Image (tube, grey):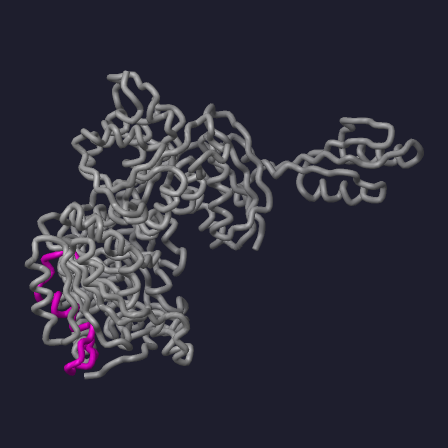
Amino acid sequence: MKPHTLSVLVENRAGVLSRVAGMFSRRGFNIESLAVGTCEEPNMSRITIVVNGDDGVVEQVMKQTNKLIDVIKVSDLTKRESVERELALIKVAAETGPSRAEILQIADIFRAQVVDVGSKTLVLQVTGDAEKIDALEKLLRQYGIKELVRTGKIALLRGAKTVKSSK
Amino acid sequence: MKTGARTLIEALQREGVDTIFGYPGGVVLPIYDELYDSSIRHILVRHEQAAAHAADGYARASGRVGVCLATSGPGACNLVTGIATAYMDSIPIVALTGQVPTALLGNDAFQESDITGITMPVTKHNYLVKDAGDLDRVVQEAFYVARTGRPGPVLVDIPKDVSTGQVLEGKPVPETVSLRGYQPTYQGHVRQIEKALDLIATAERPLVYAGGGVVLSGASAELLEFVEAAAIPVTTTLMGLGAVPGDHPLCLGMLGMHGTQSANYAVTECDLLVAVGVRFDDRVTGKIETFAPNATVIHIDIDPAEIGKNKKVDVPIVGDVKAVLQAFLSRMQKRGDTANWVSRIGTWKAQYPLGYRDDDHLRPQYVVEQLSDILKGEGVVVSEVGQNQMWTALYYCFKKPRTWITSGGLGTMGYGFPAAIGAHYARPDLPVVDIAGDGSFQMNIQELGTVAQYNIPVKVVILNNMYLGMVRQWQELFYDRRYSYTELPPVDFVKIANAYGVEGLMVDEKAGVREALETALATDGPFVLDFRVEREENVFPMVPAGAAINEMIGVRQQ
């Protein structure tokens, strides 16, 4: 059992996400994270899904996903060189005083950006892999995290290779 | 300009639709108005579920796409069991549903239901048409998706304002459909085919395990030629009955939970299993770890997701069964020496024949045997689900594909009678018989109204044991004979049939069986035969749930 990152190219149509997500849930596949948005091709979207399972399960996931008429291409990026990123917004309690300065220092180390400054809170934006965001969250917890939101993972193959429609 | 409803009917005609099974309602009024003087025949059923099953029976008997039509909300929801039945058995149907006007979608309007959402898990694909201008394309795509690749049901949901909307006349319709997300593989990979043929040439105990995919692909002739050329015995699944003639010397009959002993022993002993258009269903394999434990497995299927899903496969071949078998035949140079194996199987067949107690009691197996003897494979036999289905599978000798129609995957009680109606419209040249239980028949008994109205010559053979027999059998064997809610009070089916204007006959003696069947078959219109059979007869042999398929109970030895 290890997480696999799947890149799924789909028709940009109403109901496509629900077809993909519904198929996962009814076949008992667990989605760790999911991110969807438009892509370089007009009328297509790219969904990045992180799914947990052994190789047999992931093979079934890919085959069943591929069977959906609106799915154009499915690739497992785990077995190939790829860049993977998540983004998080973290609203952390930051009264004026030493803690505010410490938070800013931590943000700097993590290359997080301050995207909102309030009298009692700061909102940090951080990108990176899941471990980096986990680490930042852990460090900020002592100051009091008021709210936190994370995108699902998005990923692309390294180099000139692409995940294109060839199905 | 023309209306969406007219556009729909013309699109259906372009697809060659001659019959629709349906039930009218509010939002499909514009479509029904177009049907009123159209060349397409519409059969009014008594419940929408029957419309879906009839479309399915039509598809199975003809090999063409079946079509059903229902209104929004309850009408559409009533189709769902029929659509799910077709989905599990890969049957091409197009279900048309009305929908509330687009402006009211999502508003909980009267008779609104999200039928595309509801049917997403049980359709191959579905469409909600929001613009009348899309109707031509959507209908064309729907039929294409339904019948190509691994076939399956497709639903098209049409809001009322789309039916009444205006469409430009004379817009050309593309000759072919091309969907970038849907490109089925038809030709098997040559290297895999060569690898399979090498295994076939050296196997000592090969066995073909053939299923519904052979029937769907129209590959019966190729399969027969292949097993004869390679001298390989063949067992079929419930869905594959008729793919090879049941009385062929190489045919072992059905395998699985209620398979023949020779078939189940052959699977357990074989050293090469050639799986053709099958999906290693749990009712076939029993305990999967002990299914074909000594065999190298070749699996041919058009759906790559079926390969390796339940059983590890050594040589996967993705492709259309017919095309792959043709490649086998044209490339096969050498066959293995299977003489010993074939003779061993012959010994099993002689040693372990099917059988039941041959006394003067009216036993259900006898009724099926008599029907088999009368029809000689020249008819369409439909079943309900349960004991009636298994007795028919075991005791009727199917000789041709598409002459056996049953709900295999979903196991839908109430399927048979409406499916038989559909089968009649597909094959009006053949007698159509529904073998039923008293439980199943009562699930769609209202269709007596339909067969009476159109004088549809479907014969219903009820194996009436006043029980939900298969469940009772399990209660007898595994629940200490505690018959919890499986006894049904006697019903006078002849009187019910008569009330609808359908002829009927009750038979409670073995001596009357043959004559009653002949009378029903000689009658022009529909006929109901109520056979009061031995109440606690069981379907044997049987593999208990979770056991290996060679661990059968209720076996006989000659």
Q: Is residue B406 magenta?
A: no
Horizontal and vertical percent for residue B114?
45, 38
Q: From the viewer's perspective, is B244 left or right of A10? A: left
Residue B229 visible (yes or no): no
Residue at x-position 52% and y-position 51%: A29
Front one among B154 and B4: B4
Q: From the viewer's perspective, is B305 left or right of A18? A: left
Q: Is residue B373 magenta?
A: yes
Residue at x-position 36% and y-position 78%: B476
Q: Given the current orientation, which residue lies at the most extreme right position?
A: A97
Q: Given the current orientation, which residue lies at the most extreme left position?
A: B522
Region in magenta: B352-381
Q: Is residue B458 above or below residue A93?
A: below
Front one among B87 and B9: B9
Residue A118, quarter of picture: top right
Horizontal and vertical percent for residue B332?
18, 54
Front one among B317 and B249: B249
